[in-house]
Amino acid sequence: MITLSYKGKNTFLEAVNKKSGSDVLECYQCGKCVSTCPVSNFMDFPPREIMQMIKLELKEEAQMANSTWFCLTCSACSGRCPREINIPAVMEAVRHMAIEENFHPDSKRVKNIRKFHEIFLDMIKRYGRNYELRMMAEFNIRTRNLFKDMHLAPTALLKGKIPLGVKPLKSKKAIKKMYEMAEKLEKQNK
Amino acid sequence: MARVGVFVCFCGANIADFVDVPTVVEEAKKIREVKFAVDYKYMCSDPGQQMIRDAIVQYRLTSIVVAACSPRMHEKTFRKALSDAGMNPYLLEVANIREHSSWVHQKDKKAATEKAGDLVRMAVAKSIANEQLHEISVPVTKRALVIGGGIAGIQAALDIADARIPVTLVERSPSIGGRMAQLDETFPTLDCSQCILTPKMVDVASHPYIELIPYSEVIELNGYVGNYKARIRKKASYVNFKSCTGCGACWQKCPVKVPNEYNMGIDKRKAIYTPFPQAVPNKPVIDAEHCTMLLKGKCGICAKFCEKGAIDFKMVDEVIEREIGAVVVATGYDLWDATPYEEYGVGRYKDIINSLEFERMVSANGPTGGLPIRPSDGKVPKSVVFIKCVGSRDKAKGIEFCSKICCMYTAKHAILLHHKVHDSRAYIFYMDIRAAGKGYEEFVNRAQVETGAVYLRGRVSKIYQKGDKLMVRGEDGNLGQEVEVEADLVVLATAIVPYKENPALARLLGISYDKYGYLSEAHPKLRPVETAKAGIFLAGCTQAPKDIPETVAQASACAAKVCGLFAGDTMKKDPMVSTVNKEFCSGCQNCVTVCPYQAIVTEDIPLGHGAKETRTVAKINEGVCQGCGSCVAICRSMAINLAGFTDPQIINEIVAI
């Protein structure tokens, strides 16, 4: 049971709208985004329901949902949205707000998601591309779950799905510059 | 010697799928009098009619049988084809082989074909005895009666009167204006109801062709299309309108307070009152049920303060008679009483109101000066829950149909709430948003985007009190979860039901109504403004729930129908009426009793040629007679004959099978 009470201002809705540059109130709940989304099956709340949560000021529910983290920002949804809402931007806004506000720091799920993203960015910083084997190993070590998905490794390795090494990109300087710019932008936005 | 032509229709597949049409044609050809028989895919189409016209000339036919659909559908069409070929149109007979055979015997083609053959044989036999008949002319009284002075009645009256046809407008309450006068702003443009309605009300009062009779009711209607006679009871107003100036001294001094109907009982009016400041006519009436002077014989304060001496406690009801040619019924709607919704606590919680009460509150001339308030403590609500479909689409407790306008006015209420209370939020529980109309969908989007009204998809299951809040519980289908809203005020969009006295009025007028009390139109698609009784038309919510634009359109359509009816000095009427053979009539007057249209009177004729003694015989008013045949059946001396259905015709039909 969710209790809705009006506190005089729609702070969450307004913040999401400002961050995403879209108006969530435009959503009329048709569900076209849900049937378009390639990963909506894996989400606990599909994009349409996230929109309704934002409308109803259900901040905690929206941030707790795994949907915003699953979103691939492929923009298939926004390409088909009849109300012209930039849905990936809305998902991103909710996700960024969760990170900025250090949402639920004690939740293991949130921690793991953060670690995954940190390791991924680290791989890119080092090699310019993803070194999958190392990434998986590091993730398993840092989350203290050494044998996670280990049973899949032999088949994947034999079929050549996971290369043993990685070929770093040549222009490391350019990548370094990209990271510096991103950090600079983040500081500016704060 | 009769020469009959038979024309059998396929009706596309409607007849041909279940009746073997060529066989029917062959059967018809076997009849001695049939000189020509043919089939065609669509006999009602122009090529089909041309076949009839050509055959009449070529084969010198003396009567025509068309075997097709019901005569109600195309009898007129084929009669016209006969006229065009120079033949008397009443020499046509229609054998209904669709409704009477193919549609009802779809499982047995052989039997259906046989029956179609029988029907054709009967029609041929009857047509042989057909006689040439001619349309009857009936004089028309060119005055229309409009019942109900809401926007429907006002529009109909104005449109008819603009065609220089006199109109009598009867309104039951002291002022015209109806429900629309109670509204604040109207969707989808948010123009103020008063601003667009009151000029029309003034037009009605000042129109040279409109006679406005307020505070009155129609009590009797006799006669027939073009020649009705109406009796109107004008309730005693106890105020002489001629000398009253409408100054208002009387109602300021009146000590009796009564719940104000115009403001849905939110505030009080006096026992002598005008319903609202913009009332037309702007003259007060005394409410006899509450006036102390009329009830107990004491008080009379109003009379003391009236400088013009316009108050007359001895006034009595008056009956006015008017001769009219057509009637427009526009009695409007009421809101359904939501008391059966016990789970919502209707009647138990003061802060649950209906949409018209909310409308009065947010109205600029309303009892709260345009601000919504909680009836319990007078505070301005911040969180307002609107519940749609209360009583509508509810077979169990309310009515089955959709009330049509609630989706739109609830969106409007959300916008008005936002305009009046900026830091408020509207929560709207809905099942569907039905916004079909010009600019309507855009209007609902405006409510959602501009005012942030949240739509929660589901029916509310219960309402309970928690502190000074009302907790409204329902499922939000959009969220897939149960939600509970803390509400300061709950507004119910209750179902639209017809004016409660519609059934009594319908019986008085002799028209039909449905199980909800809505007056029935003659055909749901092709005759939506006429009733089954000629000369009586319907406008507005008395026929079905509808919004203002649709009501106005229907009212104007009524006006067009009335003007069409009054276009000539006389009206044409089918010649299928009864005639009395005075030689045979014994004067028993059974026919007078049995006639449902009061079309039969008596007359005295000399007993013999030149004799002084007289005897009484029946006499039929051709204008009133509808050709039902009841008098023919009851007449024991077989003195009455119904044109088009004479004894030889009927006997021929029977003999043919």
Image: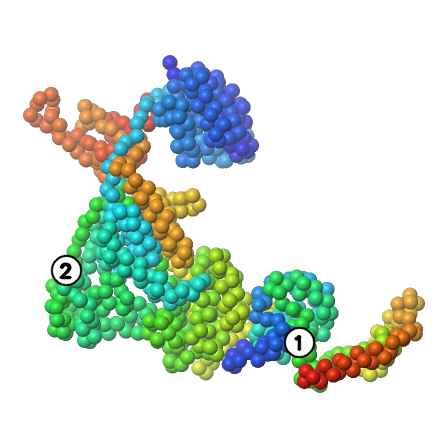
Find numbered disc 2 in the image and state the secondary structure of the residue it sits on: loop
The residue at the point 65 percent across, 69 percent down is A87
Residue type marked 2:
Val
The residue wearing badge 2 is B316
- Looking at the picture, how far across and down is residue B480, in whole percent? 60, 69
- Looking at the picture, how far across and down is residue A14, in whole percent? 58, 77
Q: In this view, does B654 lie above or below A81?
A: above
Residue A44 lies in what quarter of the image? Answer: bottom right
Q: Which of B623/B283 is in front? A: B283
Q: In this view, does B651 lie above or below B448?
A: above
* B273 sits to left or right of B15: left
Badge 2 and badge 1 in a common chain = no
Viewer can see residue B289 = no
The residue at the point 53 percent across, 80 percent down is A9
The residue at the point 24 percent across, 74 percent down is B257
Q: Which of A101/B286 is in front? A: A101
* B637 sits to left or right of B25: left
The residue wearing badge 1 is A93
The single residue placed furthest to the left in the displayed view is B612
- Looking at the picture, how far across and down is residue B118, in whole percent? 45, 25
Number of residues whose C-alpha sits closer than 10 Å to that of mark 1, classed few (under 14), some (14–19) or many (20 or more): many
* B532 sits to left or right of B612: right
* The C terminus of chain B sits in image quarter: top left
Residue B585 lies in what quarter of the image? Answer: top left
| Contact (Cβ within 8 Å) of mark 2 with mark 1 | no
The residue at the point 36 percent across, 59 percent down is B333
Chain ID of residue with mark 1: A
How far separated are the C-alphas under marks 2 and 1? 75 Å
Number of residues whose C-alpha sits closer than 10 Å to that of mark 2, classed few (under 14), some (14–19) or many (20 or more): few
Find numbered disc 1 in the image and state the secondary structure of the residue it sits on: helix
* The N terminus of chain B sits in image quarter: top left
Residue type marked 1:
Ala
